Image: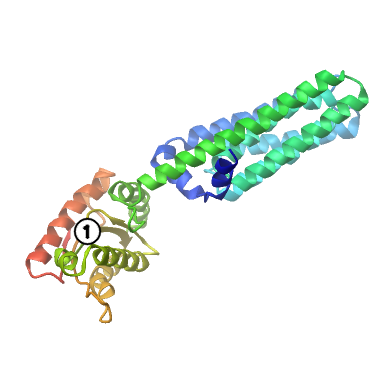
Amino acid sequence: MWTTLQEWYRQPFDYEWIIHHRSTRGLHRSLQNMFGAATILYAAASILMLFSARGPQGLLAQAWVGIVLLVQVAVALRWFFGPLPTRRDFIAFAIFGDVGLTSVLVLYEPFGALIGSGLFVVTGALCTYFLSQRWLLAHLAWCVVFVSVTVVRAMLAETEDVPTALAGGLVAIAINSAIPLLAHIAWTAIGRDARRSLLDPLTELLNRRGVEDASLSLISRSHARGHCLVVVVVDIDRFKSVNDYFGHDAGDDVIVTVAHRLKALFAEDGVVARTGGEEFLVVFAGTMEHAHDMVHRIGHTLYRRDDRIPITVSVGAAVVSSPSDLWNDGAATITRATRAADSMMYRAKYDGGNRTASIQL
């Protein structure tokens, strides 16, 4: 168990991947509505407790609850009608959820506060799916401390017998701590395996499935800006000879070198994948002039005179201009452009290799 927790804690957290993965993109509005409804639940519970004998007593306490209610309504409206929150927004919501709820519950009688602490589970759900392990642990620590202090208050006030107060505290800690922690561990493991399924193990570039997924947002951005979309197929020349004369380890080194250089070249505006043994796929967007410049830079970037094994490539490119009927094909845009680029790559290879051929669609 301890080993599992250590491995979970060390896993990198990738908010952008979670938000933009194809499995979650269609759930954005549903998730926002869910958290908006949960915030309304906060507000409804606060309103009901204003009329409870265990709720806040006195004008100042009730006024503070009213202020928090107004903020809760504003947050709910942001969830319902605003854009998808950024990572900083999620952090701000989590802090408000913990601090705001605590500031209200401390005004309740101890056992009423213990019941209300069940609402911390909403912030726990937010931390579980959209924030890192450290933020979740901070939230859990906050909950445990609050519940523990509330149990002590209940026992000192003698409003409930000790077994009832302890039992309520244990249930509250289990709900607010154990469930989000186990869910985050499972979610992290699933996310890790899902990301690995999209990567080529040798180069750590995207594989064919990964590049199709990553290219969808690139298509929408480039179309909105009026840019052209470029799909490039890059194949290492005479790669079989490299394996035959230098060995497969040297061949792997060449593949990794090409991967690193392509990734560096398209770091700012492109997606790079390894789609076959010695074949790579690049998808990027830009103006027509920029597109042709980048395509012709590929061969010069990959060849270095001081390499132990000289690297030359055959490059085929398909440029989807704007406007073009292909823009309406969604994911099929990449598939059709890849076929055209692949055909251009073979033309460059049949012409002797170390060449570039392109077509405009």
Which residue is depicted at the point 80% across and 27% down? 113
107 left or right of 263 in image: right
239 left or right of 274 in image: left
Residue 332 or residue 256, whichever sits in front: 256
Which quarter of the picture shows residue 232?
A: bottom left
Q: Where is residue 59 in the image (x, y as percent from the top left)?
A: 90, 31
Taking the image as drawn, is residue 153 in sight? yes
Quarter of the image for the N terminus: give it: top right
SS at badge 1: strand
Taking the image as drawn, is residue 39 in sight? no
Which residue is depicted at the point 45% across and 47% down? 17
Which residue is depicted at the point 72% across and 27% down? 172
Q: Where is residue 19 in the image (x, y as percent from the top left)?
A: 47, 44
186 left or right of 303 in image: right
Q: Residues within 10 Å of mark 1 (few under 14, many from 20)?
A: many
Residue 78 or residue 318, whichever sits in front: 318
Quarter of the image for the C terminus: give it: bottom left
Q: Using the image, determine if residue 92 lies above or below residue 318.
A: above
82 left or right of 62 in image: left
Q: Using the image, determine if residue 98 lies above or below residue 348.
A: above
Q: Position of residue 313 (x, y in %)?
A: 19, 68
Q: Where is residue 324 in the image (x, y as percent from the top left)?
A: 22, 52
Residue 11 or residue 340, whichever sits in front: 11
Amino acid on which disc 1 is placed: Glu
Q: Mark 1 = which residue?
A: 279
Residue 291 or residue 206, whichever sits in front: 206
Please state the total of marks drawn on the protein image: 1
Which quarter of the picture shows residue 78?
A: top right
